[in-house]
Amino acid sequence: MTATYSSLSLVLLGPPGSGKTTQARALADAYQLPLISTREILQAEIEGDTSVGRQIEHGIKRGELVSDRVMSSIILQRLDRRDCRRGFILDGYPRTAGQASLLDGILAELGRTIDRVVLLDLPEEAALERLEATEPAAAIHERFQVWRDHAPALIESYRNRGLLLEVDGGDPETQVREAVMQAVGAPVGA
């Protein structure tokens, strides 16, 4: 059983292949909140063949993160929409401690804060096994390098703020979902 919230703003973190998007969809359905997937937002920019989309596509092909300036602008526009007034589920942002600080600024501008951050913890070897069937090996390794480079500081910043909830992402999907729902429904620090 999950708690009911009048407002709930969540961030999902985890290495590539940890199941963030799957769990984010389940949370969005359970809490009737919009799922804000940066992957989907960026893909829409690319498919729209906008100048920003072309810049994003070029960087992604090289395994780079989208610049903080571009991501912040995109996230601010999305979080300022009416459907996010009661909260949201963020999947894929922030990816760095710098982006987390920018997100705090964006939310402060909108009069909001992050309520919880869920980390789906999964060893790299297990995540690689999940991804190897669907993605080119070079792209997978680039994504992991970005995670290894930026995740420790990001995770520690949320842990220090008392917002981080850790869930074992290696369990079967339904068990992970139950653990995530329990973590989100529990008081912070429980």
Image (spheres, grey):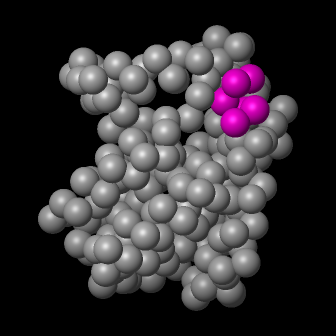
Left or right of 125 in this view: 12: left
**Residue at the (68%, 86%) spot, across then down:** 189
Q: In which quarter of the image is the C terminus?
A: bottom right
Question: In the depicted view, which residue is nearer to us: 94 or 115?
Answer: 94
**Is the residue 22 above or below the residue 28 in the image?**
above
Left or right of 135 in this view: 166: right
Q: Quadrant of residue 99?
A: bottom right
**Which range is magenta?**
141-146
Question: In the depicted view, which residue is nearer to us: 1 or 45?
Answer: 45
Query: What type of secondary structure mainly makes up the magenta span?
Result: helix
**Is the residue 155 above or below the residue 139 in the image?**
below
x, y (%) of residue 48? 21, 22
Question: In the depicted view, which residue is nearer to us: 106 or 152?
Answer: 106
Q: Magenta stretch containing residue 182, yes or no?
A: no
Q: In which quarter of the image is residue 181?
A: bottom right
x, y (%) of residue 96? 62, 52
**Residue at the (31%, 29%) spot, across then down:** 52
Q: In the rendered image, is residue 51 in sight?
A: yes
x, y (%) of residue 116? 54, 73
**Is the residue 85 above or below the residue 38 in the image?**
below
Q: Quadrant of residue 139?
A: top right
x, y (%) of residue 14? 66, 49
Q: Magenta stretch containing residue 144, yes or no?
A: yes
**Residue at the (41%, 60%) spot, across then down:** 89
Left or right of 101 in this view: 25: left
**Residue at the (32%, 25%) spot, across then down:** 53
Question: In the depicted view, which residue is nearer to us: 148 or 6?
Answer: 148
